[in-house]
Amino acid sequence: MVDFTTLMNRGHRRFLAHQKKRNFGPCEDCGEYSLLLEYKDPTDKDANWLVCDYCYKKLETDEDE
């Protein structure tokens, strides 16, 4: 179960990631060519990945576990 603040922060990050200029290329997680989102790991501020929309959602759900 996710608390309200975590849910709001996740929605805000997703909104910002979709509004930035997106590049087309291979996803760093699955390798599929698509529009990429920049995923910033909340636990490690230096970790940034360019991932597809599917992998972005997967990484967000992995944060909960």
Image (cartoon, rainbow, N blue to C red):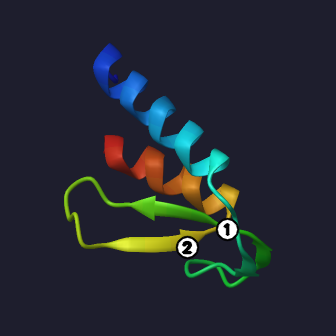
Label 1 neighbourhood size at 10 Å, few (<14), some (14-19), many (20+)?
Answer: many
* Residue 44 in the figure: left or right of residue 1: left
Residue positioned 56% across, 78% down in the render: 29
Q: Quadrant of the N terminus?
A: top left
Residue denoted by label 1: 36
- Which residue, as the protein is rendered here, is positioned at the far top? 4
Tell me the CA gap for discs 2 and 1.
Answer: 6 Å
Q: SS of the residue at dot 2?
A: strand
Q: Is residue 10 above or below residue 21?
A: above
- The quarter of the rendered structure image containing the C terminus is top left
| Residue 35 to residue 9: above or below | below
Q: Position of residue 48 (x, y in %)?
A: 39, 71
Q: Residue at x 55, y 73 (%)?
A: 50
Q: How many marks?
A: 2
Q: Amino acid at mark 2?
A: Leu
Q: Residues within 10 Å of mark 2 (few under 14, many from 20)?
A: many
Q: Amino acid at mark 1?
A: Leu
Q: Disc 1 on helix, strand or loop?
A: loop
Q: In the image, which disc is placed on residue 57?
A: none
Q: Which residue occupies 65% across, 78% down?
A: 27
**Residue 13 in the image: x percent, y percent?**
46, 41
9 relative to 25, above or below: above
Q: Residue at x 69, y 64 (%)?
A: 22
Q: Which residue is mark 2?
A: 50
Looking at the image, residue 59 sits to the left or right of residue 41; the answer is right
- Please state if 5 lies on the left or on the right of 51 as rendered: left
Q: Earlier in the sequence, mark 2 or mark 1?
A: 1
Q: Is residue 3 visible?
A: no
Whether residues under marks 2 and 1 lie with C-beta atoms below 8 angstroms apart, the answer is: yes
Looking at the picture, how far across and down is residue 28, in whole percent? Answer: 56, 82
User: In the rendered image, is residue 64 in sight?
Assistant: yes
* Residue 35 position within the rendered picture, expressed as x and y whole percent measured from the top left: 76, 67
